[in-house]
Image: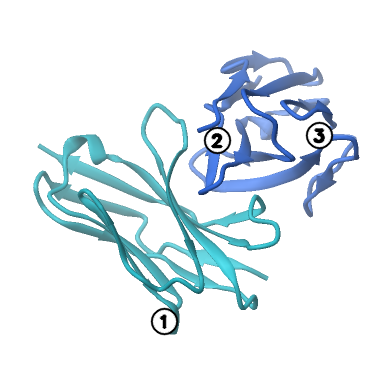
Amino acid sequence: SAVISQKPSRDICQRGTSLTIQCQVDSQVTMMFWYRQQPGQSLTLIATANQGSEATYESGFVIDKFPISRPNLTFSTLTVSNMSPEDSSIYLCSVELRYGYTFGSGTRLTVV
Amino acid sequence: AQKVTQAQTEISVVEKEDVTLDCVYETRDTTYYLFWYKQPPSGELVFLIRRNSFDEQNEISGRYSWNFQKSTSSFNFTITASQVVDSAVYFCALSEVTNAGKSTFGDGTTLTVKP
């Protein structure tokens, strides 16, 4: 099964700054998915990242706030821009396996 | 639009009890996937099962079993002889078959198993 490495695992950031989260997969995958889990809540899909094309964003999420890169089939980044305390969440990347999906260990972001 | 409802916000049981976590879903798609994930206190999300909508056979994996009832749009998860290590938040999720990574998650059920 694919192994996903996500970093940083956690960070505390000042409001107004940006943080880039990296997701590395040990095998080539067509699509990678970025989710957000706000404190005590469920997961919400932010966007789908295909290699070689712009990411597809879900309602309520925009590229200016959450720019995504997908330079190759094993790597993606999500940037949380101009952060505010409301962006404090766990951010997770996910990829498809033959039988289901696997998630990275998540990035726990706190904005102060 | 897709929707997943996990009506049980929190469940507490004593070790060795059986426990069933409910999941009810709504979708207009004729084919779809259903998932269960476990999120232990450490925070990582662990994939448990994927079920295709045209496969209504129930599944058993060790102490875990899943009951898929298309007629009632339910996909319930039972843990037999629960253990303390089963304590976690459990999420049910639904996705399109053609874009299975785009999942709609329920709000989760927090299961506490007491020794």
Which residue is the site of mark 3?
A66
Which residue is the site of mark 2?
A103
Residue A79, given in percent of the width and then of the height, sits at 78, 26
Quarter residue B28 falls in: bottom right
Do marks 3 and 2 share a subunit?
Answer: yes
Residue under the point 85% across and 43% down: A62
Residue under the point 88% across and 38% down: A63
Q: Residues within 10 Å of mark 3 (few under 14, many from 20)?
A: many
Q: Amino acid at mark 2?
A: Phe
Q: From mark 1 to mark 3, how far is it between C-alphas?
A: 38 Å
Residue under the point 44% across and 79% down: B70
Query: Which mark is in front, 1 or 3?
Result: 1
Q: From mark 2 to mark 1, how far is it between C-alphas?
A: 29 Å
Q: Quadrant of the C terminus of chain B?
A: top left
Q: Chain of mark 2?
A: A
Q: Of helix, strand and loop, which one carries label 2?
A: strand
Q: Which chain is blue?
A: A
Q: Quadrant of the N terminus of chain B?
A: bottom right
Q: In the picture provided, is B27 more to the left or to the right than B15?
A: right
Q: Do the residues under discs 1 and 3 have CB atoms within 8 angstroms? A: no
Q: Residues within 10 Å of mark 2 (few under 14, many from 20)?
A: many
Residue under the point 15% across and 56% down: B18
Picture layout, residue B36 above or below residue B41: below
Which residue is the site of mark 1?
B72
